[in-house]
Amino acid sequence: MKKLTIIIGLLAAMGCLAGEAMGQAVATLSADTIALGDQTTLSIRRALNYPSTDMLTTDGIVAVSQTFDTATQTQHTVLTSFEPGEHAIHLSPTDSLMLVVTDVEIDTTTAEIRDIAPLQRVPYTFWEIFRWVLLGLVVAAIAFGVWWLLKHREKVHELLVPAETKDTRTPHERATDNLEALRRQQLWQAGKAKEYHTELTDIVRRFIEEATDIRATDMTSDETVEAVESGKWKVVIALLRNIFTTADLVKFAKSEPLPYEHDRSMTEARQFVDELWEAVKPKEEEAPHE
C-alpha cells in the first residue's frame, strides 16, 4: 500500500511537469479560505491568455491589483471579497478555483452595543472670529469713507481738480489779445476766409457782451447792431455794421473778399473795440487832493 501511494504521487508530479512542459497553465491561490475583507493572491503560470482584473472581478470577488513576473511568466493577482460564502474563480470554461470567504463572528454576549453619538459643536477658533471682526471693520470703514466723501465733496473736488487760473484781464484787453492771436493765425491767407470772419465776429460779440449788458452772442448781426446803436455810446456804428456785413457775405453768400477787405475788417474790429471800451469802461476814482 505504501508503495502504491508513492507511485501515485510520482505519477502526479510527472503529470504536472509534463503539463508545464506542454504549455498548460497552472493556477494556485496563496490561501483558498480567507476572512471577510482579507486578501489572497491568485498566481497563474505559463498561460496562453492571462485574465485581466476586470475578468476576475465578479459579484463576490474583487481583483485589487495585478503584476506579472517575466522571469517565471507568472501573473499575480490580489483578490479580496466582502461577501461570505463560496466563490468560484473561473479561469477557463472547464477550469476554476474555489475561494471560501468566512464571515466575522461577533460575540453579542460580551460586545457592548452603543447608540450613535450625537453631533458635537466644535468651538470657534481665533481666526474664525477674527476674520468676521475684520470684515465688519472693513465694511464700516468703507461706509464711513463714502459718507465723508459725500459730505465734503466740494472740498475733495477742490483738492483733486486744480483751480482754473482766473483771467484778470479787462474785456478790452481780452478782446485785443484775441484779435492779435487771430491775425497771427493767418487764416484767410491759407484759404480759410469763413473761419477767419466767424472767429472775428465771435470775438467782437463776446467783447460787447462782457463790456455791456447786451447779449450779443445770442443775437443776429442786425439785432446786435441795433442794440449797440440804441445804447447811445459815442462809437462809429458803421464800423460794427461793416464787420458783420462782410462776415455774413462770406459765411452765407460764399463771397470771396479781396485781401484788403480782410485786413479792413480786422482794423475796424480793433477800432470799434477801442471806441466802445472808452465809452463804457469804469471811471477811475480821482486821487484825493493834497
Image: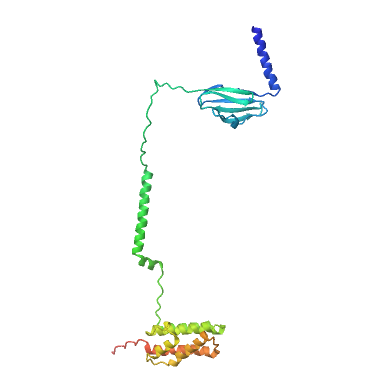
Horizontal side of residue 111 vs 289, given as left or right: right
Nearest to the observer: residue 202 or residue 287: 202
Q: Is residue 289 above or below residue 163?
A: below
Which residue sits furthest right? 22
Q: Is residue 228 above or below residue 115?
A: below
Taking the image as drawn, is residue 145 in sight? yes
Which residue sits furthest front? 93
Horizontal side of residue 224 vs 40, given as left or right: left
Residue at left offset 40%, top offset 91%: 229
Nearest to the observer: residue 192 or residue 52: 52
Q: Position of residue 213 (x, y in %)?
A: 37, 84
Q: Position of residue 222 (x, y in %)?
A: 44, 88
Taking the image as drawn, is residue 29 in sight? no
Q: Is residue 155 above or below residue 224?
A: above
| Total numbered labels | 0
Rendered-image quadrant of the C terminus: bottom left
Q: Position of residue 20 (x, y in %)?
A: 68, 22
Which residue sits furthest left? 290
Q: Is residue 93 above or below residue 260?
A: above
Residue at left offset 37%, top offset 48%: 132
Horizontal side of residue 289 vs 162, given as left or right: left
Rendered-image quadrant of the N terminus: top right
Residue at left offset 52%, top offset 89%: 263
Horizontal side of residue 73 vs 196, given as left or right: right
Residue at left offset 36%, top offset 56%: 141
Q: Position of residue 185 (x, y in %)?
A: 52, 82
